[in-house]
Image (spheres, helix red, strand yellow):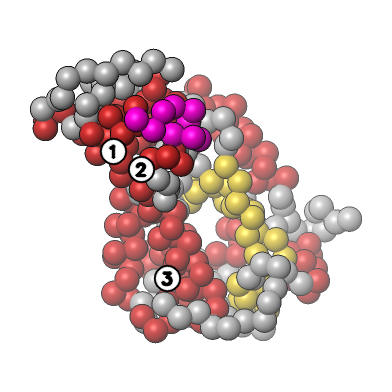
Amino acid sequence: MSELITQSRPDADLAFPRLLRDWRQKRRLSQLDLALAAGVSQRHLSFLESGRARPSRNMILHLSETLDVPLRDRNAWLTAAGFATLFRTRTLDDPQMEQVMNAVKMMLTAHEPFPAIALDRAWNVRMSNKPFDRLGAMMGEDVWARIGGGERNLMRLFFHPLGIRPFVTNWSAVGPLMWRRAQREAEAVAGSEMMAVLDDLAPLQEPHILWSAADPALLPVMPFSLQIKDLKISMFAVIATFGTAQDITADDLRIETLFPADPETEALFRKAGGGKGAA
């Protein structure tokens, strides 16, 4: 890749160098680490971060890909360096998103009789299957209204006092893990939307619970266990993303599928689903 060096730029033009440096540090990479991963010289990378070198459009896209920068933030990189944005944000009902949303619907439906949802990067539920809706209704038809926020937000569902939290029997183990996962994701994608949700929910939490997880038995994954009247439910989540997204909306989507963590929970969901998916 070209390493054309230009004269020093005024402070007003240093937005891109700051973004590059911030994202490199966010990924906990040294300049040498990033240079080796991207296949550019450390000297050139240093000049890009100091503003002594002006990046090409291809270099911006290459470095942002190397750092796994979300598409919406790659647009910000391009704009900061004086280029037009590249990635679009389509609505979920955009005709060009039809095949993507069909794929999401297929994944959610194929996962029945177990719950599955599609989330955006602020953990708002954009699509859900029938088992997930039934699970939510078990905690009250008005559960989403009780937690407020205007969106069906999974973090609010878990961490609002009027949401799912009173039903979680292993809260001291799963609560801190889920909270820190949300924090890591928000930091990893510069997620101001998620940080706003966390800031809103933080005053409602007990600090000693959030910052000191219980010492559970060593398990392959940490399930969350629910007690809803006489029903005991234990599940764990698997998360999938689009590997070649070229649209910001698609890039933000996460498919979260819930699996039973014990035979009793599996039998419960299979019975509720009329035996669909039975082996």
Secondary structure type for disc 1: helix
In this view, the residue farthest toward the front is 43
Q: Which residue is pictured at 62% across the width and 81% down the height?
A: 216
Which of the labelled discs sits on residue 23, or is there none?
2
User: How far, Cα to Cα, is label 1 from label 2?
Assistant: 6 Å
x 50%, y 66%: residue: 178
Sort mark 3 into few (<14), some (14-19) or many (20+) by Cα contacts within 10 Å. many
Q: Looking at the figure, which quarter contains the N terminus?
A: top left
Q: Is residue 166 left or right of residue 273?
A: left
| Circle 1 Cα neighbour tier, 10 Å, few/some/many (<14 / 14–19 / ≥20) | some
How far apart are labels 3 and 1 at the CA level? 32 Å
**What amino acid is found at the position of numbered circle 3 in the picture?**
Phe
Q: Which residue occupies the foreground of this view, 125 or 37?
A: 37
Residue 238 among magenta residues: no
Q: Which residue is mark 1?
A: 19
Q: Which residues are magenta?
A: 35-43
Q: Which residue is mark 3?
A: 159
Which callout, 3 or 1, points at the residue further toward the start of the chain?
1
- In which quadrant of the rendered image does the C terminus lie? bottom right
Residue 203: x percent and y percent?
A: 29, 74
Q: Is residue 130 visible?
A: no
